[in-house]
Amino acid sequence: MERLLIVAFASAALMHAMPAAAESELPEMSASISVGYVANGDDTSFLDEGFGKSPYGSNDEGPAYVDGFIELNQALGTSWDAKLTLSGSNNLSPALGVSEATLTYRPLPESGLRYRVKFGAFRPPVSFEHSSEGWTTQYTVLASAINSWIGEEVGGLGTEVKVGSDDAANPTGWNWDLFASGFYGNDPAGAMLAWGGWTFWNGQTRYGDRIEWAPIPVLDIAQPQSHYAEPYIETDHRPGYYAGGTIDRGQQLRVRALYYDNRADPNTYSNGQWGWRTRFTSVAAQATLPMDVGLIVQWLGGSSRTWDVPPPWSLGPVSDIDYHAAFTELTKAFFGQRLTVRYDAFSVSNLDNFPGDPNGETGHAWTASYQWQISRQWVVSLEQMWIQGHRTARELLALDPNYDERVSLATLRWQL
């Protein structure tokens, strides 16, 4: 149903844009496709019903499609614009799906303030890494654990209202904004983190996508839970919300804080998915250090729980977790090239007493990435990740609970 709503919204927005385009110009289009060579991983990928931490697992060595997108932007007069983003995937079906579809109202600034109202399907503005078109990462191929999770299962259908200072009318150089959103269709958010753990990904789920979990016993116990995750489902018809704000001083400093609460009833169910009551806080900062070294730091912490076991057992929720993650990233551009180093630390705390569902996890990862912009349209990337940690649930599949993964890839990206 959610996929049908997204397609209907996108079609309506583009049909509304067609008269304007006929009178002025066609929609602006940006696109990108990335291919490469991937070395064999150390575990089965989380996208292939495993506990591997990246999209590239054992038996994946060889040439690979990495990612891609097509994005259309259409101005509708002076105050409105429409955007449609289609993201590609070789792990999910269909190969091309809707990841964002919005209609945005941007009136002219008034009394030193800028206003914006956005309608449609979108994600909360958690990530400073995904600063390129198509919600793609600018500094590395694989995103941090925090923002990989946002791409996996956080988003919805809703409205976002934003008010901020007009930088053109602000002589101090400091600017700010406040934003808030109400949304539907993200009630299963938290399930992939609880039953799959933190991961590192260069993609994002599209509306209607399904990701098969590893065959853990709780999926048979928590009937009628499907053996796949489908994050963009509404189970209780209660809106969720997020709110936050940003302060910045040009390229020198930017800080953003955001609070998210999907307000899901954990005892509701729809289309094979239980509702998960998920709440989190994110704080991120981006700065330019001496010698034009870029810095991004981010922390996210929250909680998720689902399905209170009914009497006579009364064991509490089937799954109840707290989670935290943080990363620090340094990046330096020089002569059309870029070097980036990132350190991630992440954890999940298991709070429930339900047998057969151990969700606890601790881990950390290092990422080293090199990019060479050959021309405006072509970029070469070399990237290496080292991921180590402990996840108790791996023992359920007769795996060592301690994991030590290496991810090596070389990519060639074409961008329009």
Image (spheres, rainbow, N blue to C red):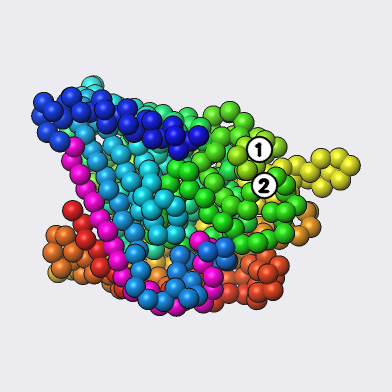
Identify the residue shown where x is 20% and y is 28%. 18
The spot of residue 304 in percent (x, y) is: 62, 46
In the image, residue 278 lies at what x, y percent?
59, 43
Question: Which residues are the magenta region?
Answer: 27-47
Check if residue 116 falls in the magenta segment. no
Relative to 22, say whether 230 is above or below: below
Answer whether residue 285 is visible to the viewer in this image: no
Q: Quadrant of residue 369?
A: bottom left
Of 92 and 284, the residue lying toward us: 92
* Residue 261, image x, y percentages: 55, 37
Q: Is residue 30 magenta?
A: yes
Q: Which residue is mark 1?
A: 269
Q: Please tell me how crowded label 2 is: few (under 14), some (14-19), or many (20+) other residues with Cα within 10 Å.
A: some
Q: Residue 225, labelled with which disc?
A: 2
* Element carrying mark 1: strand
Q: CA distance from mark 1 to mark 2?
A: 8 Å
For label 1, count other residues whose C-alpha is less than 10 Å away and answer few (under 14), some (14-19) or many (20+): many
* Residue 413, percent from left and from top: 25, 63
Mark 2 element type: loop
User: Which residue is farthest front?
Assistant: 94
